[in-house]
Image: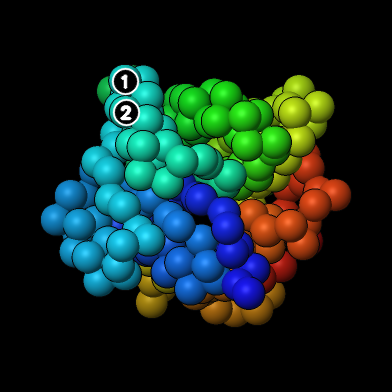
Amino acid sequence: MGRLEGKVALVTGAARGQGEAELRLFAAEGAKVVAADVRVEEGERLAAELGDDVLFVRLDVADEAAWAAAVAATLERFGTLNVLVNNAGIGHTAPFEQHTLADYERVIAVNQTGVFLGMRSVIGPMRDAGGGSIVNISSGAGLRATKYMVAYAASKYAVTGMTAAGALELARHGIRVNSIHPGVVDTPMLGEFFDAADNALVRATPMRRMARPEEIANVALFLASDESSYMTGAHVPVDGGITA
């Protein structure tokens, strides 16, 4: 049996990068998986490649109604929901005084409000299933802030806080809530904001390299599985030692 055999998981931001790695690994470990993303073409292609146990749904995580539709589609197709990985996220870099309100609100809408809506949306189905696991992808910037990323840091610190609050409140329903805090990960999103070949964060990382998306996915798999059955409210750095 796979480590997620019999479980149904919903992964946001699943069309590429960390989300794609998590989706592929979860499916390989026996889960039925809902791939949720705003990138329709890439998401549909990925679902078609992985077969009938993967369903693609278009999901703008900042849209409350879209969350309701995604959860409803999950239940209609697979009958239950056991795991949520709140992976979708965006970034923005600029000096503090040059961060516009629009830039700030855009990052908060996806990274913070999207996680809140996702957590809230799955409580009922997970309670009905007798419990579940919520894995929130925060960031090393949710443990120690980084210059020029005030909106991103604010959103990721919020994810850290929501993880702790959710863990305390939802434990009585058998719902575990944990967060992962990646450092610099080799994904398409990174290339939109940093020169990976000349990145001060990579140079500051004790392991002196970026993480592979699969290395983050392996930790998400552990937290999604019953192997971590006594873990809730944990904030797990996967950052090559940068927050040590």
Give the CA separation, mark 1 to mark 2.
6 Å
Vertical placement of 72 versus 49: above or below? above
Question: Residue beneath label 2, please?
Answer: 69
Image quadrant in which you'd find residue 91: top left
Q: Is residue 129 left or right of residue 58?
A: right
Q: Which residue is mark 1?
A: 65
- Few, some or many residues within 10 Å of mark 1 (<14, 14–19, 20+): few
**Disc number for residue 159:** none
Query: What amino acid is at disc 1?
Result: Ala
Query: What type is the residue that disc 2 sits on?
Result: Ala
Residue 229 is left or right of residue 135, and the answer is: right
Task: Quadrant for the N terminus, please.
Answer: bottom right
**Residue name at image x 85 percent, y 49 percent:** 230
Q: Are marks 1 and 2 in contact (CB under 8 Å)?
A: yes
Is 164 positioned to the left or the right of 28 in the image? Answer: right
Q: Quadrant of the C terminus?
A: bottom right
Find numbered disc 2 in the image and state the secondary structure of the residue it sits on: helix
Residue 228 location in percent, x, y? Answer: 77, 56
Indicate whether 144 appears above or below 108.
below
Please state which of residues 180 and 166 is positioned toward the viewer in this rendering. 166
Kindly identify the residue that appears in the image at 79 percent across and 31 percent down. 171
Q: Secondary structure at mark 1?
A: helix
Residue 125 in the image: state x and y as whole percent: 55, 30
In the image, residue 181 lies at what x, y percent? 63, 53
